[in-house]
Amino acid sequence: MITKKQKEILEYIKKYQSKHEYSSSLENIKKHFKMSSVSTAHYHIKKLEEKGFLRKDENKPRSITVFNSEKMVNIQLLGKIAAGQPIEAIIEKETIAIPQSKISNVNSYYALKVVGDSMIDENIYNGDIVLIKQQDTAENGQKVVALIENSEATLKQYFKEKNTIRLQPANKNMEPIIIKSNKNIKIQGIVIDVINSLPKTALEIQTAENSIEKTKKELVLNKIICGDCVEVLKDMPDNSIDLVVTSPPYDEVRKYNGFSFNLHETGKELFRVLKNGGIAAMVIQDQTKNFGKSLTSFRTIVDWVDNIGFKLFETVIYRKYGTEGAWWKYRFRVDHEYMPIFLKGERPAFFNKEPLKIPSKHGGKVMTGSGNRRTDGTTTKTITRQINTMKCRGTIWDYLNAGDKNPLKRKHPAVFPDKIPLDFIKCFCPNNGIVLDPFVGSGSTLVAAKQLGKNYIGIDISKEYCEISKERIKQSINLFDKLK
């Protein structure tokens, strides 16, 4: 998507090349469009280059080449939309140009100019233009144009909660708009693209960066923070965490003291704070309702991979003894949970599976094994060798006899064995690494991190659960002292 000005510049360059048989210079573009500086012309050329319409060789005065003549279509710029307090959209007769291949039906899209700074954490700034796809529904976390009380339009992130709609600004200094009835709000479209306004000056950029740095708090280690995990994570610096191990609340299977959670927004913040090569390991399951699974685990995996940027390193099965009460006439007993392991970057920064090895059934014996079947259908030769006493753990992790009987821990409604975070930390966390649990619950991840001598950070919105975790940390410290 390009702006009206960028389209005019592109047409000017085409005509100039056709007439003169060589490229226009940035100075020519500046003079023709009466720009204040060559840097403004360079900005537009850079944007056209990024979007595939031009090529410009650096440090050459007349090296602008048009190499994409894709047909452009005009989208109506309907007016201004508030990314602050709601205001009405104002009708203005203007259009913007976008490649025809970007949209399916020109009549299903429109554009609005942004007013205000409530969406700056989503890189939407005052003066930017947003491309909107017309639709009357939205999913949690999407950026929407919402009409409130049939009179005021605003640009916010959409969240449907139990009995309310929350329109959330992407600016920590602003409060959300809470709508108590679906009748008082209409979705008019979702944001699918953003065109940034003219470039900021060096002073503006520096001021903005300094402002962001001031709002970022220093990383506080070996603490449990009581608060909404998304908001707390926003205060953490980028690329600062080595490993996340957590079990998020899902499907309202447990009440969790009445709090609700957003796994999409949590995933975005976790991706940001994780170091390159960092791992986020999750314990999750699906609710069964009317004999059908909710698929929350699968939806979360797809969302975090497709929309946030994680790779799915592996999905491990946590094997356990299912609750006998759930083994009723028309169901199987559920003896497992999923443990998707998400990776940020190309490969894990730290990976040591030696502590996770398990005893080999025929360890120490000399055996002749059958050949392995290749992907092309052929079979390798049989070999005779001594079997190692320990072998690589597979993707089913057995915690049938975890033995977690701590009465303090069991005050939480949904716990997992302490050995789970112990295994993940041993495998994926370096010696001086930092372990984070954004849904700290009963504190199992933090207790494991403490036991292994790692730094930790825990977050939970429930004060009660924070206190349980703090007490468990104290208990573990006292136990370690006794064992010394």
Image: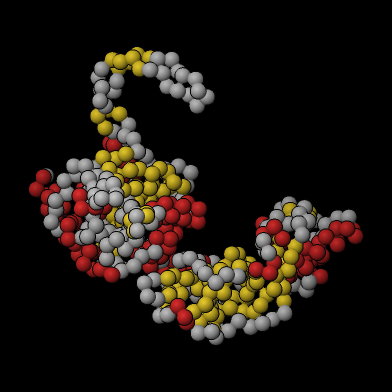
Q: Position of residue 71 (x, y in %)?
A: 77, 59
**Quarter where residue 49 is shown:** bottom right
| Left or right of 203, for residue 167 | left
**Quarter where residue 162 is shown:** bottom left
Q: Position of residue 468 (x, y in %)?
A: 19, 62
Q: Position of residue 306 (x, y in %)?
A: 50, 53
Q: Position of residue 344 (x, y in %)?
A: 45, 49
The color scheme shown is secondary structure
- Camera-nearest residue between 401 and 421: 401
| Left or right of 242, for residue 474 | left
The furthest residue to the left:
482
Q: How many dots with numbers?
A: 0
- Camera-nearest residue between 12 and 287: 287
The furthest residue to the front:
329
Indicate the quadrant containing the C terminus: top left, top right, bottom left or bottom right. Answer: top left
- Camera-nearest residue between 155 and 433: 155
Residue at figure coordinates x 13%, y 56% from the top left: 407
Residue at figure coordinates x 29%, y 50% from the top left: 330
Residue at figure coordinates x 24%, y 57% from the top left: 414
Above-or-below relation of 14 to 91: above
- Camera-nearest residue between 120 and 382: 382
Residue at figure coordinates x 70%, y 55% from the top left: 52
| Left or right of 154, for residue 323 | left
Indicate the quadrant containing the N terminus: top left, top right, bottom left or bottom right. Answer: bottom right
The furthest residue to the right:
19
